Image (cartoon, rainbow, N blue to C red):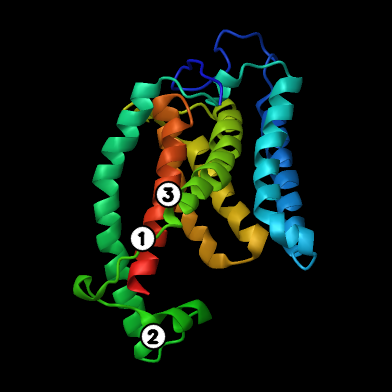
Amino acid sequence: MPLDSHDPGGPAPSPDAPAGAFDRRRELVSSLAVFGAVILACAILYQLRAIPFVRRFVHDLISAIFLIVPTILISRRGEDFALYGLVARPLGRGLVFFGVLSAAVFPLFSVGFLIYYRTVCAWVTAGRAMPPVYIRMCPTFAGSWAKMRPRVDGRFAWLAAGQLLGVALPEEYFFRGYLQTKLDRVWPPRRRFLGGGLGRSLVVASFLFALGHVLVDFNPLRFAVLFPALVFGWLRSATGSILASVLFHASSNLISDFLHRSFF
């Protein structure tokens, strides 16, 4: 990740640019085309898991696509990677936003996790029609803090490294770094909160992130990632780089994994 500075708002066409200097429709179409091609390639790889080599390296191959495609496209256009937030600086701002947001969100998420599964598993016990995944999980659900079984073993360090480098970094590199920046050019944010843009580009980029998850493995429950994606996108915009969103993304996955291991 290059260590350069970047304006938190991301690039946007100048209001003084000559007419026709920036074609928003063309930028949108090209962005969606890149998204479609990348997700199609990932979906094909995922469906080829019957091949031993693909099954062994499918996640690594998908991560490589997320990293390589935007790198090639940005390099071919001769653009600065800092314009896409593919930087670590401003380091302090990124770390502060990550730390403060984590302290505020993760305790609430943990409480919400318990309430959600207590409700859902009560419906399963009552015989309501529920997706098979809940029917399989709920018989082993520990329904209270007193019954939870926290488990952190020697594999946690490898899991954390995998989430950070193999999941969060590639996905943030493509979706928040490349794609959200392109969409910010099409729909510059009209409102800001603590420096982070709030607008159509954030919503569309987050929707595409969730849609991509669904289209790769055809699991509609994966659309739930829309909500954290909005936070990831706001972090990228507010801090000027993908550093905070990468750290928060990886931490979110680790917290979720820890809770599932502890309650199921």
At x 40%, y 50%, the residue is: 252
Residue depicted at x 30% and y 36%:
99
Q: Can you say which quadrant of the picture contains the N terminus?
A: top right
- The residue singled out by tag 2 in the image is 139
**Amino acid found under the numbered disc labelled 2:** Pro
Which residue appears farthest toward the front when viewing the image?
Answer: 154
Q: Where is residue 98 in the image (x, y as percent from the top left)?
A: 34, 36
Residue under numbered circle 3: 228
x, y percentage for residue 138? Answer: 39, 81
The residue mark sitting in front, 2 or 1, is 1
Q: Nearer the viewer, mark 3 or mark 2?
A: 2
Q: Residue at 74% across / 28% down in the picture?
A: 72
Q: Which is more toward the observer, 159 or 199?
A: 159
Q: How crowded is mark 1: few (under 14 residues within 10 Å), some or many (20 or more)?
A: few
Are there few (<14), some (14-19), or many (20+) residues within 10 Å of tag 3?
some
Instruction: Specify the quadrant of the image occupied by residue 243.
Output: top left
Q: Nearer the viewer, residue 173 or 14?
A: 173
Asked if the residue at tag 1 contacts the one at tag 3, i.e. Cβ–Cβ closer than 8 Å, the answer is: no
The answer to whether residue 118 is above or below residue 162 is below
Name which of mark 3 and mark 2 comes first in the sequence.
Answer: 2
Residue 61 horizontal/vertical position (percent) = 71, 48
- Disc 1: which residue: 152
Q: Which residue lies furthest to the right in this view?
A: 51
Mark sitting on residue 106: none
Measured Cα–Cα span from mark 2 to mark 1: 22 Å
Rounded to the nearest angstrom, the CA distance separating label 3 from label 2 is 28 Å
Q: Is residue 254 left or right of residue 12?
A: left
